[in-house]
């Protein structure tokens, strides 16, 4: 069977998307399959030009979430506002509809973990694709103050400016991701959201925040899901803070992709089991 759904990125590494989508397709007895392809930049344009004849849906990851927008004939409201699409759905003969399921997945993960951003001060580490989705969602969900901390300060400033274009009266600040700035920014924070790739396998010994900055009354959500308990989450657990790992976000964004592609209610339990057994092997 020719795979009809695909995840693209560069470098793609060991993507877990085929595993969780194929587990779902099998459980739903759907006659389709999901594959992955690492697409280096020089062939990205060519791949996208002919992709609509070969695939019915594309999951998009680093670094193409913004680049795919120009191949879309339509955009969902979230993809247009966030400026990134992680999901392409066929839009008739006209091409692709670009959607963003990362933002909703952040919202659902926080909600189902009992972490309502409403009225809270949120520290967002990172200013890349995941940060754009998370920043948009926590303000949408009522965060009263958002502080974006990023290694490349100009990207934090750009994300702040873009969020203020959407949420005119929101309280959004941008700082450097360094010990001094974090120390000040983190005081009084209710929720810390890490969307940098610090702590991701194989650099699992690293944390974007030192342990002494994490306090009991702070909740910590790490979008990194491999390993499931990152060094940041280990520090947070040791400090008595509430912790949420990135695995649920991965599952929820995938489930929403299947709703968009196939109109199905994805079996999250089946997908979670497949994901956990793979992550448990220590990728
Ligand atoms: P991205 O667009 O490439 O952004 C990467 C971010 O990490 C940037 O803010 C970058 O800072 C920062 N960064 C990377 N290495 C760093 C280092 N050594 N020190 C300081 N900052 C560093 O990637 P993304 O799509 O946002 O993904 C980021 C992470 O979120 C990845 O680990 C990814 O697996 C995870 N993620 C998880 C889910 C999920 O479903 N759970 C979904 C999407 C992403 P600069 O701007 O300075 O380069």
Image: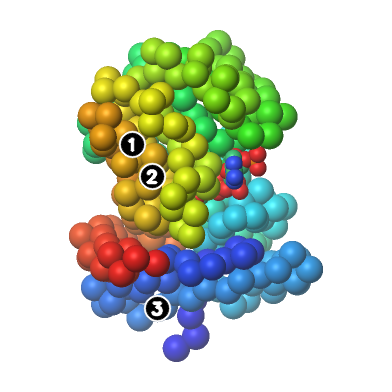
Examine the rendering and report whether any part of residue 167 can be seen: no
Q: Nearer the viewer, mark 2 or mark 3?
A: 2
Examine the rendering and report whether any part of residue 50 can be seen: yes
The x and y percentages for residue 32 are 40, 78
Of 233 and 113, the residue lying toward us? 233
**Mark 2 residue's CB less than 8 Å from ligand 1:** no
Quadrant containing the C terminus is bottom left
Q: Nearer the viewer, mark 1 or mark 3?
A: 1
Q: Which residue is at a point 28% across and 76% down the rendered structure image?
A: 26
Q: CA separation, marks 1 and 3?
A: 42 Å
Residue 244, above or below 192: below
- Image-based side of 214 in relation to 83, left or right: left
Query: What is the secondary structure assignment of the residue under circle 3?
Result: loop
**Residue 32, numbered label:** 3
The x and y percentages for residue 176 are 63, 25
Write down the residue under mark 1.
Answer: 235
Q: Tell me the quarter of the picture where residue 191 sits.
A: top left
Kindly check if marks 2 and 3 are in contact, taking CB atoms under 8 A apart as contact.
Answer: no
Write down the residue under mark 2.
Answer: 231
Q: Which residue is at a point 58% across and 74% down the rendered structure image?
A: 37
The x and y percentages for residue 91 are 57, 60
Kindly check if marks 1 and 3 are in contact, taking CB atoms under 8 A apart as contact.
Answer: no
- Image-based side of 114 in relation to 181, left or right: left
Q: Which residue is at a point 68% across and 34% down the rendered structure image?
A: 152
Which of the marked residues, 1 or 3, is nearer the chain's N terminus?
Answer: 3
User: Callout 2: few (<14), some (14-19), or many (20+) C-alpha neighbours within 10 Å?
Assistant: many
Kindly check if marks 2 and 1 are in contact, taking CB atoms under 8 A apart as contact.
Answer: yes
Of 244 and 5, the residue lying toward us? 244
The x and y percentages for residue 249 are 37, 47
Q: Which residue is at a point 34% across and 40% down the rendered structure image?
A: 233
């Amino acid at each position: 069977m020719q795979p009809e759904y695909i995840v693209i990125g560069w470098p793609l590494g060991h993507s877990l998307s085929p595993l969780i989508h194929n587990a779902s397709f099998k459980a739903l007895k759907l006659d389709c399959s999901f594959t992955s392809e690492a697409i280096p930049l020089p062939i990205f344009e060519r791949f996208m030009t002919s992709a609509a004849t070969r695939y019915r849906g594309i999951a998009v990851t680093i670094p193409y979430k913004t680049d795919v927008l120009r191949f879309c004939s339509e955009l969902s409201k979230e993809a247009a506002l966030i400026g990134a699409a992680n999901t392409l759905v066929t839009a008739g003969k006209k091409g692709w509809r670009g959607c963003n399921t990362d933002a909703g997945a952040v919202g659902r993960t926080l909600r189902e973990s009992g972490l309502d951003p409403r009225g809270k001060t949120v520290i967002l580490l990172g200013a890349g694709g995941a940060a754009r989705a998370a920043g948009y969602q926590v303000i949408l969900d009522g965060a009263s103050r958002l502080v974006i901390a990023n290694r490349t300060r100009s990207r934090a400033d750009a994300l702040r400016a873009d969020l203020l274009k959407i949420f005119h009266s929101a309280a959004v600040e941008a700082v450097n991701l360094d010990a001094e700035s974090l120390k000040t920014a983190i005081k009084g924070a209710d929720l810390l959201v890490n969307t940098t790739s610090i702590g991701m396998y194989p650099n699992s010994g690293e944390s974007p925040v030192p342990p002494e900055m994490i306090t009991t009354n702070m909740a910590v959500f790490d979008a990194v899901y491999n390993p499931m308990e990152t060094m940041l989450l280990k520090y947070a657990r040791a400090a008595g803070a509430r912790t949420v790992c990135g695995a649920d976000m991965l599952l929820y964004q995938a489930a929403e992709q299947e709703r968009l592609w196939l109109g199905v209610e994805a079996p999250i339990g089946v997908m979670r089991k497949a994901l956990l057994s793979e992550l448990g092997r220590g990728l």
